[in-house]
Amino acid sequence: MNNPNICSICGKPAAVRLSNPDRRLCAEHFIKDAEKRVFEAIDAGKMIREGDRVLVGLSGGKDSTALILILSEYVKTRPGVKLIAVTIDEGIAEYREDTIKAAERLVEYTGVEHGIISFTELFGDTLDRLVADRKNLACSICGVLRRRSLTEAARRFSADSIATGHNLDDEAQSVLMNMLRGDKPSLIQDSSLGYTGYFVPRIKPLAVLSEKEIVTYILLKDFYSPLPECPYAVTALRMEARKIIGTLEEKYPGTKLNIVKFRDGIREHVPYSPKGKLNTCKICGELTSGEICQVCRVLNRKQ
């Protein structure tokens, strides 16, 4: 009878139990397993090519910490690939200061080039002030402004792609949120591609790892730091989706993966291609599908 408390590979004490397939791994083999799955996903999806300059969104939280650690390992065998980490300072009091410090410690360890871009610099004010009278919309507004910030960062650093720390849980939650909103276009389209030739593509190397696996990875790598949670997170629909999917995953293991596979199956049978031409925003001059871009709308600059 197999000992349930030892690594399936080397026989050392197990640190983690994984499913799909069911196996137990020691710390060393779990780290190798997680990195291998991410490496294979990158190569299979052709996310990173020789000579690419990859902008990595580094918030300092658990997902982006795992992302920069794993990508730092990935590029060791691909010396032609350049990583540039960028931290977006939204201006959230008693939250962002700690995560910026964590990000700075991480880039010092990995040796990755690092830049910081603030909402105040780009949009004239902090997120706290921008959402002072509409805190219920804070997450939506922040999402729009963060996307523009990363786009600007990619422009400044001449990046070929933008890597974000979205994990399997995030992807499953997004599917459920799109369904709850009745947002069929977002369910069908891969927003990371956008209008080919116009926007820097976004890649999600960690989408094959669950949030639990990511926390385990950074714990075993000794890079876990307890950090405050964003004070606006409680206002988001994502929090509700997270609870629902978490409950279902506990009762029916594999739920998260099946939800993402369901979405991917839809995209295969209903391919999305952007319709219409792009315009330039009447206010800021950035590309948009309408007359006024989302950034200018959320900044209340509408004419």
Image: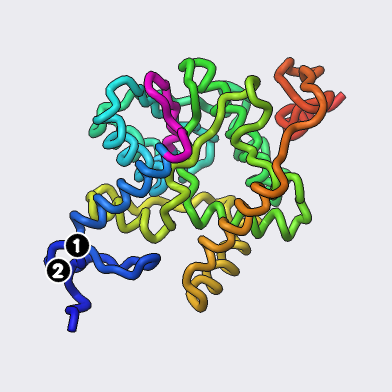
Label 1, on which residue? 26
Q: Which region is colored magenta?
A: 44-58
User: Residue drawn 51% across and 78% down?
Assistant: 251
The verdict on residue 56 being magenta is yes
Label 2, on which residue? 13
Which residue sits furthest bottom?
1
Q: Eyeballing the image, is 294 above or below 259? A: above
The main secondary structure of the magenta stretch is: loop
What amino acid is found at the position of numbered circle 1 in the picture? Answer: Cys
Q: Eyeballing the image, is 297 above or below 178? A: above
What amino acid is found at the position of numbered circle 2 in the picture? Answer: Pro
Q: Position of residue 166 (x, y in %)?
A: 49, 46
Q: CA distance from mark 2 to mark 1?
A: 6 Å
Residue sitting nearer the eye, 189 or 100 = 189
Colour scheme of the rendered structure = rainbow
Which of pointers 2 and 1 lies earlier in the amino acid sequence?
Answer: 2
* Quadrant in which residue 71 is drawn: top left
* Quadrant in which residue 140 is drawn: top right
Q: Quadrant of the C terminus?
A: top right
Q: Residues within 10 Å of mark 2 (few under 14, many from 20)?
A: some
Q: Position of residue 196 (x, y in %)?
A: 64, 25
Q: Is residue 115 left or right of residue 30?
A: right
User: Residue drawn 54% across and 28% down?
Assistant: 150
**Marks 2,1: beta carbons within 8 A:** yes
Q: Secondary structure at mark 1?
A: loop
Q: Is residue 192 left or right of residue 4?
A: right
Q: Secondary structure at mark 2?
A: loop
Which residue sits furthest front?
269
Would residue 244 be visible to someone looking at this image?
A: yes
